[in-house]
Image (tube, rainbow, N blue to C red):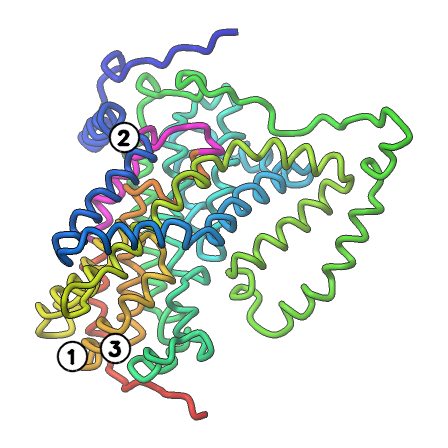
Amino acid sequence: MSQPQSRPAADLAPATTSMERFSQAIVAWAEKWFPDAYVFVVVACAVVGLGAVLHSGNPMATSKAFGDGFWSIIPFTMQMTMVAITGYVLAMSPPVAALLRRLAQIPRTSRGAIVFVGVLSIALSLVNWGLSLIFSGLLVREMARRRSLMLDYRAAGAAAYLGMGCGFTLGMSSSAAQLQATPASIPASLLPITGVIGFSETILTWQNLLVIVLVTVVSAVICHMTAPSRSATRTAEDLGVELEDDHLTPSQRKRPGDFLEFSPVLTIVVVLLAAGWLWNAFRSGNPFITMSQLNTYNFVFLLLGLLLHWRPRSFLESFVRAMPSVGGVLLQFPFYGGIGYMLTKVGNAQGVTLSDEIAHWFVSLAHDSGIFSVLVGIYSAVLGFFIPSAGGKWVIEAPYIMTAANDLHAHLGWTVMVYNIAETLPNFINPFWMLPLLGILKLKSKDLVGYTAVQFLIHTPIVITVAALLMATFSYHPPVIPAH
């Protein structure tokens, strides 16, 4: 059966409002010009590689850094792969599939569905970014099956991504806030500069709550105003996406040797084996922090998938069904490892890396805490475009940023949050975190970036300005160094 042809952007009816016209112009541009995610990361490699060569004057060192870094984030690549797969497997279990169907019935209009997905994505990201990314994507697929809804699949997919663009570093998923609150996690060289900064100084401040409310409201308004009119809507069918049922049809036992595949005995054994480890992992600290660790998150979701599928055969079939969603992650993430090494490992004659040079330049422009906050936000967003890893990037940037914060008497906890608030903004236009979602939706980055770029253009000046203004509501406290 041939797939339906997509309607060219030029054939769509004209937008009805100025915001919709603006967004549709960007969407049309992205669909025509934005490259595939693989091309995007290779271009980024070329740009950073050229910058590293010009900075260091050493092409061989740059090449070595790229090769050394290429496999440096393989553990993280595997973790991200499992985030996508375990989320998919869990969603195909009967209980979660039923929940997705019920949630998909709540919105009554396409515009309402897009807003609903966006707000839910941000709310879930405050608890766990992986849950937000996968669950929201699967919810969009479920909504798209409602023929009566006439859902714009691109705009809904972009809404599912909002938690990664402006939410997850404001909640328990914040790697930088977690690192600074845990003495054992703070590098020895950084501890004297920052001390221990508890959640009461970062994600649990009223200022952060205000930012969360602000970004949620702004995101929802943008979703509502940029949702295409009915005549301009492009459904999954228009885009050639087949929405086959994600729910599994139970297989039948065909031979005596299939007994264990259709029996819950092995599932029970595995869960019992894991029970002691889970007990130790969760009793020792905050469960939200424990779940934010990717290995723990994936382990829990894998076990939940086993339990909810109950029989190994159903679990195995769902696992195989989930595999196509992770091809982009496996191919492209290593390139970001190479980019990170070129930025942080290639030094000039004085041993200063390109990342160091950029940081020093930004910090040198600051003369007071307000300007400093703006510069931290801009710097974090710029570097986040090339190194989209909140926790790892913070370790690189923190010595320069926090030393300057102490010199300028800027509040250390809010400096962490300014970094957090701005660091995710490039995610709107960088496909790095988008890859698992694209695999689930069976779309390309160009299909979503038109809508997420509008979010980026509106959020960036608002969020960085508000974060800088809120710095004035804090008083400086010297670093709190724990006694040994």
Residue drawn at (36%, 59%), measured in percent from left and top? Answer: 390
Residue drawn at (61%, 74%), measured in percent from left and top? Answer: 284
Front one among 42 and 237 = 42
Residue drawn at (46%, 11%), measured in percent from left and top? Answer: 3
Q: Amino acid at mark 3?
A: His
Disc 3 target residue: 411
In the image, the segment drawn in magenta is: 439-462
Disc 1 target residue: 408
Q: Secondary structure at mark 1?
A: helix
Residues at circles 2 and 3 in contact by the CB criterion of under 8 Å: no
Q: Amino acid at mark 1?
A: Leu
Disc 2 target residue: 35
Badge 2, how many Cα within 10 Å: few under 14, some, many 20+?
Answer: some
Q: Earlier in the sequence, mark 2 or mark 3?
A: 2
Q: Secondary structure at mark 2?
A: loop
State whether the magenta stretch is mostly helix, strand or loop.
helix
Residues at circles 3 and 1 in contact by the CB criterion of under 8 Å: no
